[in-house]
């Protein structure tokens, strides 16, 4: 999880380029008086400590309200800490659906991948104690860790923390559940990795990787002899006074959790849980994350040495495979998303950032070590990107109010295209480019016009860029430039640089290898025939637990063989009648979460394995039989049972009787979930014509279905 949690490549169909010129508040009033949290003995009160931060608090509240009213966020909680004192704290938005539980500073939120900072601190604490060496192979500490690829023996703890391990990405089966602290996803990681190969040499380049941090969590448990939840409480939350930080294994009070909602579903949702604690399963508050930030500003050396905190803040991303220097939001340290983020680089300030996104929660922590300040923002709904922009705004306003900065820097642009004749050789960069989220078609005309379209989103209008005198392609308003780089590995990359402005929130800088050029290939007739039989077919997920949030959010996965790039399906090269692999080598974010497609047949039905997720071909999904009473039984393999809804049965009301360890969900003809029993709580529902219904539960579970 990062900044964005991904449940396998099968759920990703977004346009791969990030281009963008891109309810009444029920909040308590932000604290008017600074709250003393802790102050090191060497510190003494100063004029700074007596500031009221009135202007900063006003802006923080205005911007938080903007998130809830304009940017699709349900609720926001924020905090600013300055020299060990929480000086700004507030909330905005709605909590419970009935409006009976106001948001407070103690309302807890999932922090997603900001949890990775707890994992990193835990590893570095053990480094301080001499129990872990960052550059000793992980197998020395976890002997049972093994993979099909012998290079795994070279993976070190440092590589886990700086995303350079070469692991494929994210093992997420049963990772996100409703009010269920089942540890399956964590317990099975080593088994999952045992069947995998690496996508790159360990240490070759950094590409965002969730599995590396789950492995780091296992490392902490093996070396410390403690379970991870107990460890972080003893060595982090208790020493720092973080009374409102917990994991699903603490079974926190649901009444203390922020209310969750999903745009396509009516009503409040149960709480979200994840057993992948070390990569994204921790709950906290903005104030607690502000307290946590003291580790990185020298206020908590009893928790982590200054030497280790400084080591975490060093550049760890500058391998040979990385774009040239430019303003960016991703420059990895140990755990950190960036150790030199824009816009603080504009002010000559060292900054550290980490964001997190689960399916429903979002967070951001921004630390200014040299200023002894940090801001944290957590939300229900929205995005960690929005949260980081709010945290940036809070910090910049406070810095100005203190007089540390005189004026705010203006937003930046690369400038509009300067018209020039384009060399014919530039047309060689036309073609299909791939990333973990799909493929795009780059078409460059002789006249210097470049259009970008997505094969996965054919209805999305083309994005147009013009050739400029400096050899780049630029958007009309100059916020985005694109160029092409052929690296030493012989691969050609689309290099995207962008200043993306969100009105009222600020500007985000992006510099990344956004996609890699793919080469067409001819397929043997037998292989091509096998894949064309699958072209356009829908596949239905079978092996998520009955409490899985995925049943609420996912739509059937439709497999489409590329019409633009022979021999490919999405970014994956077809390697045989039943196999396709992603061979991308892209640093940063666009080469994350790579999964192969493997098909197999059992009892006459075709199944698809995508990174441990098992799906079944629509041809094996039969219409549901609606009678006075019928029985559906979960088979011995535990796979969910899917049925289609015929036109003649559309509109019928069915009642479902089932045990507690089971659920069912109903989908309309567009694949949108219209009822999920874990959320809805009723036992009867109308069947939509052309839709589908799924039954999930433990092996042998029986569902009694009757027509009303």
Image (cartoon, helix red, strand yellow):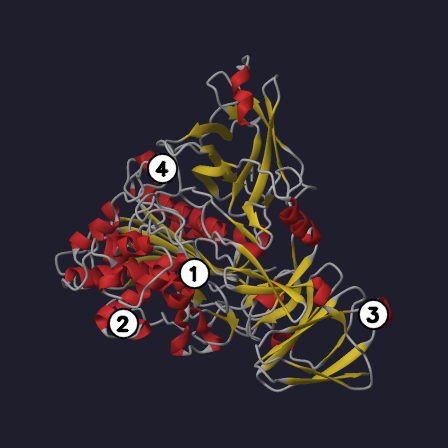
Residue at the image point whose x is 48% and y is 34% from the top: 498
**Distance CA(mark 3)–CA(mark 1):** 39 Å
Residue at the top extreme, as displayed: 421
Residue toward you, 180 or 618: 618
- Mark 1 closeness class: few <14, some 14–19, many ≥20 residues within 10 Å: many
Check disc 4 and report the residue beneath it. Answer: 321
* Badge 1 element: helix
Check disc 3 and report the residue beneath it. Answer: 650
> From the image, which quarter does the N terminus lie in?
bottom left
**Distance CA(mark 4)–CA(mark 1):** 28 Å
Instruction: Work out whether mark 4 precedes mark 1 in sequence or the reverse, and give the earlier one.
Output: 1
Instruction: Work out whether mark 4 precedes mark 2 in sequence or the reverse, and give the earlier one.
Output: 2
Check disc 2 and report the residue beneath it. Answer: 231
- Mark 3 closeness class: few <14, some 14–19, many ≥20 residues within 10 Å: some
- Mark 2 closeness class: few <14, some 14–19, many ≥20 residues within 10 Å: some
**Distance CA(mark 4)–CA(mark 2):** 36 Å
Instruction: Work out whether mark 4 precedes mark 3 in sequence or the reverse, and give the earlier one.
Output: 4
Say whether marks 3 and 1 touch (CB < 8 Å): no
Q: In which quarter of the image is residue 370?
A: top left
Instruction: Work out whether mark 2 precedes mark 3 in sequence or the reverse, and give the earlier one.
Output: 2
Visible in this render: residue 208?
yes
Instruction: Work out whether mark 1 precedes mark 2 in sequence or the reverse, and give the earlier one.
Output: 1
* Badge 4 element: loop
Check disc 1 and report the residue beneath it. Answer: 112
> From the image, which quarter does the C terminus lie in?
bottom right
Say whether marks 1 and 2 touch (CB < 8 Å): no
């Amino acid at each position: 999880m990062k900044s964005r949690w991904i449940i396998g490549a099968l759920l990703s169909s977004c346009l791969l380029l990030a281009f963008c010129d891109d309810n009444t508040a029920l909040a308590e009033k932000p604290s008017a008086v600074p709250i003393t949290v802790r102050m090191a003995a060497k510190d003494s009160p100063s004029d700074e400590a007596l500031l009221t931060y009135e202007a900063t608090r006003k802006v923080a509240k205005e911007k938080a309200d903007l998130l809830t009213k304009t940017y699709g966020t349900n609720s926001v909680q924020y905090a600013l800490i300055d020299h060990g004192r929480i000086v700004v704290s507030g909330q905005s938005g709605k909590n419970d659906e009935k409006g009976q539980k106001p948001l407070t500073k103690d309302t807890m939120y999932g922090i997603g991948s900001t949890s990775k900072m707890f994992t990193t601190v835990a590893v570095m604490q053990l480094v301080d104690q001499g129990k872990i060496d960052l550059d000793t192979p992980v197998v020395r500490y976890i002997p049972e860790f093994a993979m099909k690829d012998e290079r795994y023996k070279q993976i070190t703890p440092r590589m886990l923390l700086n995303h350079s391990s070469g692991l494929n990405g994210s093992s997420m089966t049963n990772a996100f559940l409703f009010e269920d602290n089942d540890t399956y996803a964590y317990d099975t990681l080593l088994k999952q990795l045992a069947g995998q190969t690496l996508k790159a040499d360990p240490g070759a380049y950094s590409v965002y990787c969730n599995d590396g941090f789950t492995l780091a969590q296992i490392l902490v448990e093996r070396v410390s002899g403690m379970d991870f939840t107990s460890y972080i409480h003893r060595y982090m939350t208790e020493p720092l006074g973080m009374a409102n930080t917990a994991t699903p294994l603490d079974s926190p009070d649901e009444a203390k959790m922020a209310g969750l909602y999903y745009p396509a579903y009516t009503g409040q949702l149960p709480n979200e849980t994840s057993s992948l604690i070390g990569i994204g399963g921790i709950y906290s508050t903005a104030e607690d994350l502000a307290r946590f930030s003291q580790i990185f500003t020298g206020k908590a050396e009893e928790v982590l040495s200054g030497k280790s905190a400084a080591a975490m803040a060093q550049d760890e991303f500058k391998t040979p495979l990385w774009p040239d220097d430019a303003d960016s939001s991703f420059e990895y340290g140990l755990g950190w998303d960036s150790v030199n983020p824009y816009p603080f680089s504009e002010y000559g300030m060292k900054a550290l950032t980490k964001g997190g996104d689960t399916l429903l929660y979002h967070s951001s922590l921004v630390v200014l070590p040299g200023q002894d300040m940090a801001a944290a923002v957590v939300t229900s709904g929205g995005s960690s990107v929005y949260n980081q922009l709010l945290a940036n705004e809070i910090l910049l306003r406070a810095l100005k109010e203190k007089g540390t900065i005189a004026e705010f820097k203006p937003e930046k642009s690369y400038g509009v295209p300067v018209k020039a004749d384009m060399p014919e050789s530039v047309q060689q960069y036309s073609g299909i480019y791939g990333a973990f989220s799909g493929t795009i078609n780059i078409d460059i005309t002789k006249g210097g016009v470049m259009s970008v379209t997505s094969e996965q989103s054919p209805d999305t209008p083309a994005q147009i860029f013009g050739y400029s005198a400096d050899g780049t392609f630029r958007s009309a308003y100059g916020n985005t430039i694109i160029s092409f780089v052929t690296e030493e590995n012989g691969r050609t990359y689309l290099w995207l640089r962008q200043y993306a402005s969100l009105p009222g929130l600020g500007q985000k800088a992006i510099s990344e290898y956004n996609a890699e050029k793919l080469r067409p290939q001819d397929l043997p007739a037998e292989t091509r025939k096998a894949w064309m039989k699958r072209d356009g077919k829908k596949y239905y997920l079978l092996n998520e637990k009955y409490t899985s949030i995925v049943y609420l959010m996912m739509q059937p996965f439709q497999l489409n063989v590329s019409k633009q790039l022979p021999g490919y399906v999405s970014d994956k090269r077809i390697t045989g009648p039943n196999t396709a692999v992603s061979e991308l080598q892209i640093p940063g974010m666009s080469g994350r979460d790579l999964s192969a497609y493997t098909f197999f047949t059992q009892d006459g039905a075709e199944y698809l394995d995508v990174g441990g997720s098992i799906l079944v071909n629509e041809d094996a999904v039969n219409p549901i039989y609606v009678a006075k009473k019928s029985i559906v039984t979960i088979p011995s393999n535990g796979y969910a049972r899917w049925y289609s809804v015929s036109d003649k049965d559309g509109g019928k009301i069915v009642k479902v009787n089932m045990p507690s360890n089971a659920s069912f969900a109903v989908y309309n003809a567009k694949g949108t979930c219209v009822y999920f029993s874990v959320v809805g709580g009723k036992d009867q529902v109308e069947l939509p014509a052309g839709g589908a219904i799924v039954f999930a539960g433990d092996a042998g579970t029986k569902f009694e279905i009757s027509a009303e």
